[in-house]
Amino acid sequence: MALGLISVKILSNSCYCGKALTSLSLPESCIVLGIFRNNQVILASAEPIIWYGDYILAIAFNSASVPMLNFVLNKKHPVHYLPKECFIKNSTI
């Protein structure tokens, strides 16, 4: 079995900014491991909220599922939605 490990950086226009990591709907045979933030790994079991600038760490148990997992985790709002401030992290972009 070939595993596929991916990391996706959360941008300010991500659909997941401000949501709980455990609330993500992932493709079949895929799981989220945690978040990489401020040089620390926060496990999914801690139920962290996703912030702008986080990296989501996920695994696809089948390497054929990696493109779909990457597509799902990179879901963004339309460009015109992009705010000048990310209120989740409370910092100016």
Image (cartoon, rainbow, N blue to C red):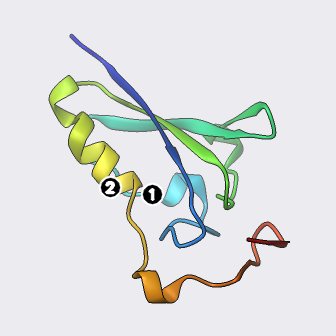
What amino acid type is highlighted by mark number 1? Leu
Q: Is residue 60 visible?
A: yes
Vertical arrangement, residue 14 with respect to residue 59, above or below? below
> Residue 75 sits in which quadrant?
bottom left
Residue wearing tag 1: 24
Residue visible at 73% across and 71% down in the picture: 93
Residue visible at 79% across and 66% down in the picture: 89
3D distance between C-alphas at marks 2 and 1: 9 Å
Residue visible at 50% across and 87% down in the picture: 81
Tell me how many marks there are: 2
Frontmost residue, 92 versus 64: 92
Q: Residues within 10 Å of mark 2 (few under 14, many from 20)?
A: some
Residue 15 rendering spot, x and y as whole percentages: 48, 71
Q: Is residue 28 visible?
A: no
**Extreme residue in the left direction:** 64
Residue 87 rendering spot, x and y as whole percentages: 76, 78
Residue 85 rendering spot, x and y as whole percentages: 74, 80
Residue contact at pointers 2 and 1, CB within 8 angstroms = yes
On residue 48, the disc is: none
Q: Residues within 10 Å of mark 1 (few under 14, many from 20)?
A: few
> Residue 3 sits in which quadrant?
top left
Mark 1 lies on a secondary structure that is loop
What amino acid type is highlighted by mark number 2? Val
Residue wearing tag 2: 72
Quadrant housing the N terminus: top left
Mark 2 lies on a secondary structure that is helix
55 left or right, relative to 51: left
| Label 2 vs label 1, nearer the camera | 2
